[in-house]
Image (cartoon, coloured by chain):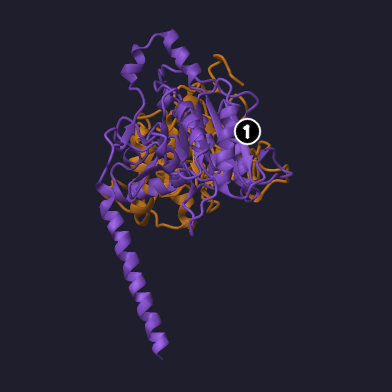
Chain colours: A orange, B purple
Amino acid sequence: MTRPQHLKSRTQHIRATWGKRCNIILYMSSEKSDFPTIRLNVSEGRSQLYWKTIRAFQHIHTHHLDDADWFLKADDDTFVVVENLRYGLSKHNTEEPLYFGRRFMPFVAQGYMSGGAGYVLSKEALRRFVKGFADGFCTHNTENEDIGLGHCMQTMKVQMGDSRDVLGRQTFHPYPPDYYLPRQTPRSRPWYLIYEHYPPVEGPGCCSDLAISFHYIDAVQMHVLQYYTYHLRPHGYKYRFNPDGRSDNI
Amino acid sequence: MSEGSSFMKGMILGGIFCLVISLFETFNSGTHSEGHEHLHHHLKPLSKDELQKLSLSQMSDLALQVQVYCLIMVTPRLLLHWATANDTWSKHCDKSVFYTSESSKALEAFDLQEQDEWVRIRKAIKHAYENAGDLRWFFLARPTTFAIIENLKYLVLDKDPSQPFYIGHTEKSGELDYVEYDSGIVLSYEAMRRLIEMFKDEDKCPERGHALWKMPEEKQLATCLKYSGVFAENGEDAQGKSLFNKKSVSTLISDSMGQNPADVVEACCSDMAITFGGMNPSQIQVLMYGVYRLRPYGHDFQDSLTFLPPKDSDND
């Protein structure tokens, strides 16, 4: 999800990094352009965010429902490791009503997935979201797209998935890695962990090796994460975490 | 005011004299006297092809021989970085010893009880050499440097430590090629041995210099090594990218965005980079995760070498 003013400062860096790894990537904006961006019939701004999200999913439902199995919404300052998303989704059935992301507890009884960390809908979840609006079961009842969508998912009986890895570590992150990874002395939840549904872990256990997303990532950090994920590595090192059940070095 | 004006004349004359002398020295830097001459060496790792030619037993022999002793020069002033180095990259050294200027209640270290950093480096080097056991490669750094030891081993894998090696990011100062301290210094066993011999020579390699202003430690080290016939070599990958960096990853990336906007990461930094500097403890912990953990599922590398994760560690 982006806007004309961000194409140069943010979105081009997504296009240069993880955007290429999606099967299809659509840049949603209020204006059409040769970037290329798709024009949704909305104006920019926080108050329009839920409308924008609704229109984006309606567009995808109309034009691309059969072009993919899963549908990820991310912001123009979200870094995504697409391979790890594919891996996480691989054991799930897209014909079931499922939705994955970073689970937050408040405002919606079953919770909702953080917008900034990115969330992904199964094909059936997408159908139900669009149908919910078409039939009037879901309405534009908030400006917060993540809470709004979460509410509609609950109404349309879409299940909340658990995106944590086999060791219980989070894969979707609403903030950059330096919020979670540095070791802390035991303390009460800092403000950015207040909404967590699952008990948050600070320090190395916060984050899966096969992380899917980080948010509030600026242009420089986008390329830094790209370098860390796809380039810089300790040659010959046997990774500790082997989720497919082969020898674990833990 | 005739005293004042002759004083001024004296100052100006003296200033011009100094300027001429220093300019003279700079222009003189091109002359070399010896036959066995130091060219700016570029040291690269074995290529993948060359590695694949080695047998499994040759490979495991090399992996054993390439063990690294890390000398980490700390002070209580650098406590946070000291603690971070202790908790991160130093765990990947075969042996790591923190050498401190004075003891700290918070962390264990070998207390050199010495304020002068060059003197501390000399003592640490002697101590490391005497306690090396079977280890034949030495890595000297401050805790503000982050090192990927596996990539260091990869670089020196086929180099014989009974030969003198002095490796890192090289810079030139007049006639002297030296390895920058801030991006880490690699020494082979033989280089250490020669260096320790040269420490006995108070003229060529003084412990406490008498100059009005002191040479930085990195240049003093380079000078002592040069006298013992050991010359600085720049560690690079196959593409000529520097493996030793004193800048942070963010700075290097940011620079690359300015210079190579179409190819930021490819043009920036090596996949097998060894060191980065200038990072705060928080960034270092993220780097630790980025190096040893964060990766895309399904990208498997058939590396000829194997290095196992260290015991009792949860952040790698």
Tell me the residue at 59%/24% (across/down): B310
Q: Foreground residue, A31 or B68?
A: B68
| Residue A170, above or below A237 | below
Tell me the residue at 73%/42% (across/down): A186
Tell me the residue at 55%/32% (across/down): B70
Horizontal and vertical percent position of residue B10: 37, 77
| Residue B232, above or below B58 | below
Please identify the quarter of the rendering in which residue B43 is found.
top left
User: Which quarter of the rendered picture does the N terminus of chain B lie within?
Assistant: bottom left
Q: Chain of mark 1?
A: A
Horizontal and vertical percent position of residue B91: 59, 30
Q: Is residue B148 left or right of residue B229?
A: right
Q: Amino acid type of disc 1?
A: Gly
Please identify the quarter of the rendering in which residue B59 is found.
top left
Horizontal and vertical percent position of residue B266: 33, 37
Secondary structure beneath dot 1 equals helix
Q: Could you tell me if residue A29 is visible in this image? A: yes
Q: Foreground residue, A30 or B238?
A: B238
Q: Is residue B263 left or right of residue A154?
A: left
Circle 1 residue: A205
Q: Is residue A73 left or right of residue B309?
A: left
Horizontal and vertical percent position of residue A87: 47, 25
User: Which quarter of the rendered picture does the C terminus of chain B lie within?
Assistant: top right
Q: Could you tell me if residue A130 is visible in this image? A: no
Q: Foreground residue, B198 or B47?
A: B198
